[in-house]
Image (cartoon, grey):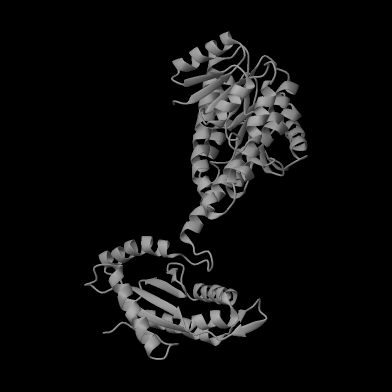
Amino acid sequence: MSARVLIVDDLFPNVKLLETKLSLEYFDVLAAMNGPDAIAICEQGLCDVVLLDVMMPGMDGFEVCRHLKNNPVTAHLPVVMVTALDQPSDRLRGLDAGADDFLTKPIDDTALFTRVRSLVRLKAVTDELRGRAMASRDFGMGDPLALATAETGLNASVLLVEDRPGAAGRMASAIGQHHAVTVEADPHRALLLATEGAYDAILVSLDLEGSDGLRLCSQLRSLDRTRSVPLIMLAEPHERARIVRGLDFGVHDFLTRPIDRNELQARLRTQVRRKRFSDVLRGAVHASMELAITDGLTGLHNRRYLDSHLGALFDDAALRQRPVAALILDIDRFKGINDTYGHEAGDEVLRTFAERLRTHTRNIDIVARYGGEEVVIVLPDAGLCEAQAIAERIRERVEALPFAIQRASRSVSVTVSIGVAVREPADAGPGDMLKRADLALYRAKAAGRNRVEAQAA
């Protein structure tokens, strides 16, 4: 797995040692001898992982890490602090600054390569989300990176899988200060809870009585419902090989016993922040996709969605020799509503009109705003008689109840004219069917409006 690793250290021999080790594993290596240079490289997007020495003159590693994690442009970059300091208080200080992990000097090669590969995989997923999420700014949704970076990592729902009552109690007490924690001793029950619940993080003891905690981690990583939930292993110091194996198949982090409550809280907070960072970006992606195919005023599908989906639906109906129908609806004398009551009242009418259409159509139907006050409804598996009946029901419901306008201070009567057409064997495409529906709509308008007309026989 190739990736760009930035080594930040003020001592040249340390840089060369790490550079040699990483180059032999086919990583591309960059170097910076001080904090400001490292920050500049990161802000230019030139690296994928940062190996950051703690003890540097001027701007130390803690300050550099804090700067990177508080900047929306660089907050997603994994930072591994490399230090000779091995006290829990030192790790806690780094975690509070936002570090993703620690490597203690002298650096073990296996730990180095495993951690870097794990973080590179994580960043690759985040990068894809970031790229897609930035498109949401084009829809006026604000900056998703700034929103994601502001996440605190608190008030999470946490599942703790631990069968030692004493250890479980101590950890639950520490976690419970800032999060809601569920403790489960049985790994099978824990798997069910994880798939049914909406947990922000899961901690798993590797040495469960009569069970393999690492296998539970593997199962959680393989299931769709739990694949993106951060996993933290709880291990004995001698279980190093199992820790490396877990990190290799995607476990996010680990703690070794005896577990320091402050480090537990800090690592959990880091993982929750990372998950929520991704969740915010994923939400922005989904929202931008929805906006791209949705009419902003009515909430119906837009013309782009209709154009991109109608062809496939029409071709499938032709292939299966199944009927498909199209309705074109046009609100009668809509211009008069705008001229008399104002465009805001016209918008209210359109929104209410859309709500009534959604109420009287199926989930499989395409309901799209075609332009202005025109709406197209595509009805899969509907013949001409059925489509006419649906159109007539819609016409009646629109006419039956006045439309509230001007914030419900008054109401106005609204009617709709509808043209109906179905797919014919000779149709070259859906455009032919829509053209017949449009001609039928024209006849409905010419015949006095507030009526349904079907395509000419």
Q: Residue 149: x and y, percent?
A: 64, 40
> Camera-side residue: 163 or 206?
206
Give the percent coordinates (x, y) of residue 404.
61, 80
Q: Is there any visible trace of residue 364 in the rendered image?
A: yes
Task: Examine the rendered structure and indicate whether residue 185 appears above or below residue 366.
Answer: above
Q: Nearer the viewer, residue 225 or 190?
A: 225
Judge from the rendering whether residue 375 lies leftward or rightward of residue 400; answer left or right. left
Query: For residue 35, which quarter of the picture?
Result: top right
Q: For the view shown, which residue lies furthest in the bottom direction?
A: 448
Image coordinates of residue 150 in percent, x first then y, are 67, 42
Q: Is 216 positioned to the left or the right of 263 in the image?
A: left
From where the camera sits, is residue 202 visible?
no
Query: Which residue: 46% across, 21% down?
Result: 27
- Answer with left or right where residue 163 lies relative to residue 311: right
The structure residue drawn at horizontal position 31% and vertical position 75%, both measured from the top left corner, is: 435
Give how far across and how far down residue 146 sits, in percent: 62, 43
- List the single residue furthest toward the top: 13
Where's the C terminus, which quadrant?
Answer: bottom left
Question: Quarter of the image containing the N terminus?
Answer: top left
Q: Nearer the viewer, residue 277 or 149?
A: 149
